[in-house]
Image: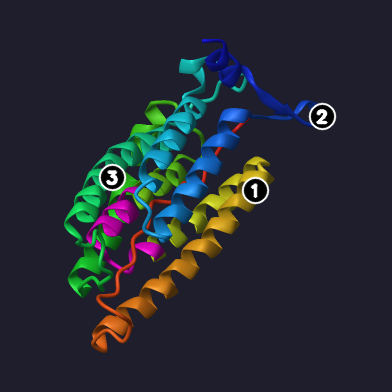
Amino acid sequence: MELLQWLFEARIDFAGGQFVLLREVLGNVFGLLSALGGMRRKVWAWPLGIAGNLLLLTVFLGTVFGNPNSVDLLGQAGRQVMFILTSIYGWVRWRQAQHTGGTAVEPRWASWGTRVLLVVALVGGTAALTPLFRALGSYEPVWADAWIFMGSLLATFGMAKGWVEFWLIWVAVDLVGVPLLVGAGYYASAFMYVFYGAFTLTGFFVWWRVRSRQERGGESDGAVSVETAHLDPTVRRE
């Protein structure tokens, strides 16, 4: 119990009264390790990612958990819940594949019809969620929060389906996240979005290369497959 209390109260202080909650730091570290583990097709990436999501959920629901920076970012909190549910599914699926000798994700291109539906869902979902998030008191500009939530949802769905394009959806999330954070003065978190943006763009070309090998008949030993956990950059307001 003392350890849990320490975890909820611990913070890293900076000059000028600025601070970062230790839970946010640990949540991001777990998210990064989960992404790296997923790229190496390690099943432990999923439970590690869940632990990071739980920590970040307590950060974004500031008024619920009595954080010093009592600000609710409902889009970000919703992302954590979505990631937890998706990770449970992914964890079970990967374990089943591990036991049967199969593969959990095999990269493939989405059809043009699917690509159009993804764009429509991203734009339409953002427009629909913006007034809802605003009514619930989410952080302005609310449309950016809604865009990040919808993009994360679609990217996670695309990852589960094995669509190469899901990496580009993550890039679209990062492109909105960086100016949002810079405008709010959260330069450290904005830098993390830049880092993840480069990471996801690299992932797109990795999957593209893997898919190209498959289309040429599989030049490597056995079937070529890539599996990855979600990425989880954050937005925080002090």
Circle 3: residue type: Trp
Return the mark for residue 182.
1
* Residue type highlighted by circle 2: Gly
Left/right of residue 51 with respect to residue 196 in the rendered view: left
**Residue appearing at x 38%, y 60% in the figure:** 169
Instruction: Rate crowding at label 1 as few (under 14), some (14 to 19) or many (20 or more) other CA atoms within 10 Å.
Output: some
Q: Relative to 155, does residue 225 appear above or below in the rendering?
A: below
Q: How is the image coloured?
A: rainbow
Mark 3, secondary structure of its residue: helix
Q: Amino acid at mark 1?
A: Val
Give the distance between the C-alpha atoms of the residues marked 3 and 2, in whole angstroms.
43 Å
Q: Main secondary structure of the magenta part?
A: helix
Where is residue 106? Give x, y as percent: 25, 67
Q: Earlier in the sequence, mark 3 or mark 2?
A: 2
Q: Secondary structure at mark 1?
A: helix
Q: Element under label 2? A: helix
> What is the magenta range?
153-167
The answer to whether 162 is drawn above or below residue 127 in the figure is: below
Q: Residue at x 44, y 67 (%)?
A: 203
Calculate the distance from the C-alpha at mark 1 to the C-alpha at mark 3: 34 Å
Residue designated by label 2: 16
Taking the image as shown, residue 113 lies to the left or right of residue 176, namely: left
Q: Which residue is mark 3?
A: 91
Instruction: Give the mark nearer the N terminus: 1 vs 3.
Output: 3
Q: Residue at x 50, y 33 (%)?
A: 139
Of residues 79 and 33, which is closer to you in this image?
33
- Disc 3 packing (10 Å; few <14; some 14–19; many ≥20): many
